Image (cartoon, grey):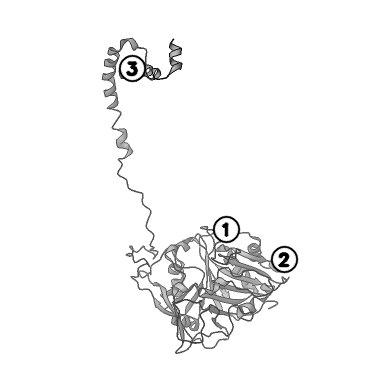
Amino acid sequence: MKGIKKWSGSLCQVPGQRRELHTSQTGLQHNGLQFAYFDANTKNLTYWNMSSETLYSQENPLAYTLAKLFARRKSPDIAYVTYNDQPFTGEEEPAKEPHGHHGKEYAHSKGILMADATSGMWLVHSTPQFPVNVHMGEFNMTRTARKNGQYFMCLTIPAIEVDVIAELLLIQSVIVNHKYGPDRVVKKYPHLQALIRGKPIPPTTDVKIAPIKGINRTIFTAIAKPPRWKKDIYTHVITEQAKSDIWVQSWRRPMFGWLYPVCDRNYSVKDVELLRFNFNSTSYLEYSYLNDHSKFAVAVNTSLFCFSSLNRGSTQFQRGGELLCRYNESVAGLFRRTVAKVEACNATDPSGKPRPPTVPGGTTTTKKPRQRPTTSRKPFVTWTTRKPAIKPTKTRPTTPTRRTTTKPVTTKSTRKPTTIRTKKTAKPKTQKTIKTKRPRPNKKYWE
């Protein structure tokens, strides 16, 4: 491949210093710098292989593959886009959505697509703010990546697959952070050219599933969820692809719309509670899903494994997203052994509240339907029927009696009764007494 380094593999980063981490390996440091790794050349996937490099090293697989992206000079032979729903905005903590995109329909996806005239590279990952910047002269990784577990999956592809992937990115409405496209390269890839120039495609309500062939003839399945397809993709798509029950690891929080396990369909969907990375028969690293920001799904009874950009939560229904899946028993078996505990079918949410009735389709959430506030006021209709018939009957008999008692004031308005006139006649007396209390000026006036 001209200019782009070849690498197809997966990298799983270990979370940083946390009390919830449990390990039996004395050489493992809880600083968020170490990672486990495997690629196409890894023969044995019984256990995870810890790399001797660190996540911030200039010699790790990511730095090696993305060398042209971080070089000081842009290459005239390479086009690229980096996309991230939490890009670097000048502040590393906390990672935020870009201005103007909060709550909008766009992709919850992170990745990099690079291509030259003969081939390409697609990296999907879960790390916010990565890359911080491009063409800085050296590989850079944000400090926020050290806090939680992250996942990177890289695929080297032939040229024919580049524009297929670019179309999938357009379907899910990714947020492009860095882009560069020499004309002599992008003219071969119309969808990549549209992505670089910011030209969207007509929105769709259908999930796009496309086979992707790697450079070594490995077959993957790429899935693009458009924002207008508002369902749980694990329940409605991944189970049908796997033809099996699945386990899902994702960044779950009640604020993102808690989804319960699905056990009322042909295939169940259960969420991961505890992860355990085995390095050999005696050493391991174990931690809660709360410390892992990665997203993946693995079939229980078949060989499907999917790396995902989508969390399992109701707020993700209105977001675009992507999944890169592969049928491989060695990879699926490695991740099945990494799952130490999953939720039961009758699991409750973290608050301990009783579970609401299951909605068909497995989209039961903790959110309650909106209800109008109840008040003790009577309806408006009863108020209108109460007064009109009574008000005229009270006013008509009283008006003649008031007019007969005050004949000298027949020219005055009948709205005010005679009591008002008596008050007016009484006012001069009170005014005189008030004026007489004043000293000399009043005496002179009356004299």
Residue nearest the observer in this picture, 186 or 19: 19
Q: Is residue 384 left or right of residue 50?
A: left
State which quadrant residue 394 falls in.
top left
| Marks 3, 1: nearer the viewer | 3
Residue 271: give x, y in percent of width and height.
41, 72
Mark toward the viewer: 2 or 3: 3
Q: Secondary structure at mark 1?
A: loop
92 left or right, relative to 239: right
Q: Residue at x 53, y 68 (%)?
A: 322
Residue 178 percent coordinates (x, y): 64, 66
Distance, label 2 to label 3, CA atoms, is: 98 Å
Q: Quadrant of the N terminus?
A: bottom right
Q: What is the count of numbered marks?
A: 3
Give the distance between the C-alpha atoms of the residues marked 2 and 1, in whole angstroms: 30 Å
Asked if labels 1 and 3 touch by Cβ distance under 8 angstroms, the answer is no
**Numbered disc 3: secondary structure:** helix
- In the picture, which quadrant includes the C terminus? top left
In which image quadrant can residue 53 be found? bottom right
Q: CA distance from mark 3 to mark 1?
A: 72 Å
Crowding near pointer 3: few (<14 within 10 Å), some, many (20+)? Answer: few
Give the mark nearest the N terminus, 2 or 3: 2
User: Which residue type does callout 1 highlight?
Assistant: His
User: Residue 151, how many percent across, how many down?
Assistant: 53, 75
Residue type beneath disc 3: Ala
User: Circle 2 sits on which residue?
Assistant: 183
> Looking at numbered disc 2 in the image, what kind of residue is underneath it?
Asp
The picture places residue 9, in percent across and down from the top left corner, at: 57, 80
Query: Between residues 123 and 93, which one lies in front from this camera angle?
Result: 93
Disc nearer the start of the sequence (3/1): 1
- Tag 3 residue: 426
> In this view, which residue lies farthest toward the bottom?
281
Residue occupied by mark 1: 99
